[in-house]
Amino acid sequence: MRNRLCLLWVLYAGCSGPPDDSSTPVDLTDEPLRELAQSLGRRMGSVVNPLIEPDPAFEPNLLREFDLIIPGNAFKPKNIHPHLDTFDFSLTDEMMDFASEHGLELHGHTLTWGKASSLPAWLTSRTDWTRPELIAVLENHIATVVGRYRGRVFAWDVVNEAFCDPAYEANCVVTAGEDGGMDGSFWYQGIGPDFIEIALEAARRADPDAMLYVNDNGWELNGSPKASKLYAYVSDLVTRGVPIDGVGIQMHWGMTMADLALPSPEWQLRLEEAAASLRANLQRFNDLGLDVRVTELDVALPDGPPCSSEQDLARQAEVFVLALRTCFEARRCPSFNLWGFTDKYSWIPEARPGYGCATIMDSNYVPKPAYHEMKTWLRSRL
Ligand code: XIL
């Protein structure tokens, strides 16, 4: 089938261990997540990756539960821009057609990301780029990619992971008087901190109607160094009229808030504190006139087998509901996007060895407590 999605990571499955056949599959007579979210005027999204082998269960589950997709890797410059003068749109066109055919919104991820792993070698291996040359490369990349999907990709992560907390991230450039900083990798080094507004302006020129986002991780807590830096930077953009529509909050919990889903005597208390802090944080960005989207939520647990203890799964469910509640209770948080909905294709076991089980369904598409609890909360709001 032309638009069939295929999975790049078919070679490794999320949670190791025997399949868990003790739970029940999704109840098909029940309203799916997307319908419940739509009743509240919001959307439910998931990351997707392209397939090398058909997985007959992936597509029906995706289409039943979600009305928005984020291609996980296809739009990254390394994949879409293999040579200075060549673009490869085969995968992104396929995903765009898939989204259009099924009435899904497609959130483009990502136009600018300084990490070498997202950038093509022709760009990073040359060391004598001048600033004007790099600006031209960046503007051409954005004009070409955004221009091709003008009117179709409704929102872009124009910039990804440009901010940092010096306590946790290498390469963090901190300005005097501030605690958080800017990630000093490729675009920052070559162009300077204004690469962000150059990118935003280029995206606006290429599609005046697309929503433009700055996306980052680890800024969940209000007053954390990274959140403060992001807020100061973005407020300045807004004040100066630089085109920006919102900020994305990744929420790789278990990664950036490492212990939130794990047992501890003060767990419930920390959960409540985290909820209050997150709420205040989203609110102050909304107060700037910006949307906030949850863009990449997953909640990693210590890996099994079996997948995880009942207590861990119950805590994981509380964390998913906390995130959902905070987003959907915020004035402007139009979509809640998961970085995968089945452990079968979650990136966590590879990115964080010893952890897994980070999504709302197990490797056999059996829903976990997180799935059921999210639905219970959504129903309670109708
Ligand atoms: C991850 C993908 O899911 C992996 O397949 C890839 O190997 C590395 O990148 N933050 C982001 C995403 O913005 O682009 C990352 O995606 C996960 C962390």
Image (tube, rainbow, N blue to C red):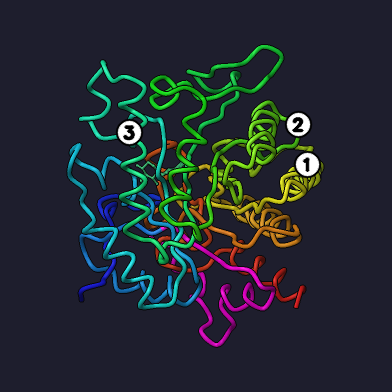
Q: Is residue 81 left or right of residue 253?
A: left
Respond yes or no on whether mark 1 lies under 8 Å from ligand 1.
no
Label 3 near label 1: C-beta < 8 Å? Answer: no
Residue 42 part of the magenta-drawn span:
yes
> Which amino acid, mark 3?
Ala
Residue occupied by mark 3: 136
Placement of 167 over or under 330, stated as above or below = above
Q: Nearer the viewer, mark 1 or mark 3?
A: 3
Placement of 342 over or under 23, stated as above or below = above
Residue 295 part of the magenta-drawn span:
no
Residue 163 pos. (x, y %):
56, 30
Label 2 near label 1: C-beta < 8 Å? Answer: yes
User: Pointer 1: residues within 10 angstroms few (<14), some, or many (20+)?
Assistant: some
Q: Which of the image's four quarters has the C terminus?
A: bottom right
Q: Nearer the viewer, mark 3 or mark 2?
A: 3
Task: Specify start and end residues of the magenta stretch as a single range.
Answer: 19-47
Residue 215 pos. (x, y %):
54, 43
Alpha carbon distance from label 1 to label 3: 40 Å
> Which amino acid, mark 2?
Gly
> Which amino acid, mark 1?
Ser
Identify which residue, 25 or 109, lies in the foreground. 109
Residue at (60% x, 51% y) in the render = 245
Asked which secondary structure carries label 1, the reply is helix
**Is residue 300 in sight in this rendering?**
yes
Give residue 223's mark. Answer: 2
Where ligand 1 lies, by quadrant?
Answer: top left
Identify which residue, 186 or 371, lies in the foreground. 186
Residue 170 pos. (x, y %):
49, 18
Q: Which of the image's four quarters has the N terminus?
A: bottom left
Question: Which sits earlier in the primary sequence, circle 1 or circle 3?
Answer: 3
